[in-house]
Every structure is written in C-alpha cells, then in structure tokens.
Amino acid sequence: MTGFTRPLGLNHAAFLTHDTAKTMDFYTNVLGMRLVGHALDDKVGSTGEAQQFLHTFFEMEDGSCVAFFELDGLADEPDQTIVPKWVRHIALSVPTPEALEEARQRLVSAGVDVTGPVDHEGIWSSIYFFDHNDIRVELTFQRRPLGDADAAAAKTAVEDWVARAG
C-alpha cells in the first residue's frame, strides 16, 4: 500500500474562458504550451448540474496543466458573469487509485463533504471538496499520460466548439 501522505504536485488549475479559440492561440502560440486534453459534456460530473462545457488542458514542461472551461450560454461580460463554483479549482495529483481512496476516507473522517470519485474521459479519477476558504480542490489520479491521440481529439473538440459558437 502506497498510502496518501500529500499531493504529488499540481495536475491542473482551472479557469473560465469566454473564447476557447483565443485561449488556445495564446497558450499554444504565445506561451508555447501544448494542447493535450479535453473533456466535453452536457453534465458536470462532480455536481450533476446540466451544463454544456468544453474543458481544455494546456501542458507545461513539467507535465502539469493550466485548464480552461468554456460554458455554453454564459454571458461574455465579466461584470454580468456568475461563474459556477465548480469552474475555478485546483487539481492536485495523487500517485495511485488507492491513495485517492485513502485521501477520500481521511477527508470524510475529518467531516469534509467529498464528491466522487468521478471518472473523466476514462483518463482521470477525481474527488472534489471545498477547503475552509471555499476554494474547490480536486484530488486526481491520472490513469495514463496524455499523448498525441488525446491532443488530436482535444484539437478537434476545440475546432467543433468554436465552429458551433461562431
């Protein structure tokens, strides 16, 4: 048993975008990051809320990612935008599924309300909770590295999203 002692490192930090095409251009062409993955759904796995979204992942040199959500139907003006609590979060990697379960049990034992584990695209298994500052935290076990096929699928998802939104 490997045990859960503390997170391995940052898996991703997620933010809102109103324009996935511009976000992709900036993070890939300006910063040189690689679009490596995506999640596309009509329902939020961790809350059950009905919401169509595209979640994109841009990889840094160490393998960690900056991620973005574009939500279908959300107003573009920041002062008019109410961002759902599940969008902004930090995701921390754990080494094994067993470590994820041990963390879940430890959190529940401490009285923390935990959602999951939730399967995302067959790649990530995650649990979700809020810290005392109302910051959403995701602990995630990534079953496999993201590769060229994932990057190609993410590119197609972005192109389809942009074409539909445009």
Image (cartoon, rainbow, N blue to C red):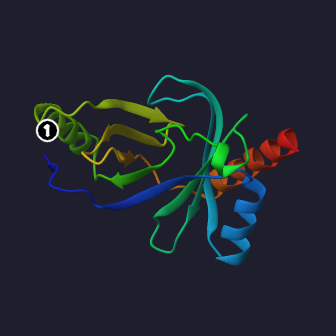
Q: Left of 135 or right of it: where is 159? A: right
Looking at the image, how many numbered discs can be counted on the residues? 1
Give the answer, above or below, for where 13 lies relative to 1. below
Place residue 117 in its image quadrant: top left
Q: Quick one: 152 or 69, which is closer to the camera? A: 69
Tell me residue 107's x, y (percent): 18, 38
Q: Quick one: 17 or 43, which is closer to the camera? A: 17
Tell me residue 11's x, y (percent): 41, 57
Q: Left of 6 or right of it: where is 8? A: right
Place residue 7 in its image quadrant: bottom left
Give the answer, above or below, for where 34 lies relative to 137. below
User: Which quadrant of the rendered structure holds the C terminus?
Assistant: top right
Q: Residues within 10 Å of mark 1 (few under 14, many from 20)?
A: few
Residue 139 visible within the image: no
Residue drawn where x is 73% and y is 74% of the image:
29
Residue drawn where x is 63% and y is 43% of the image:
81
User: Residue extending furthest front?
Assistant: 79
Q: Quick one: 32 or 137, which is closer to the camera? A: 137
Place residue 27 in its image quadrant: bottom right
Residue drawn where x is 75% and y is 49% of the image:
158
Q: Amino acid at mark 1?
A: Arg
Identify residue for label 1: 106
Residue drawn where x is 54% and y is 37% of the image:
121
Secondary structure category for the residue under label 1:
helix
Tell me residue 48's x, y (percent): 49, 22
Tell me residue 62's x, y (percent): 44, 72
Q: Left of 136 or right of it: where is 113? A: left
Residue 133 visible within the image: yes
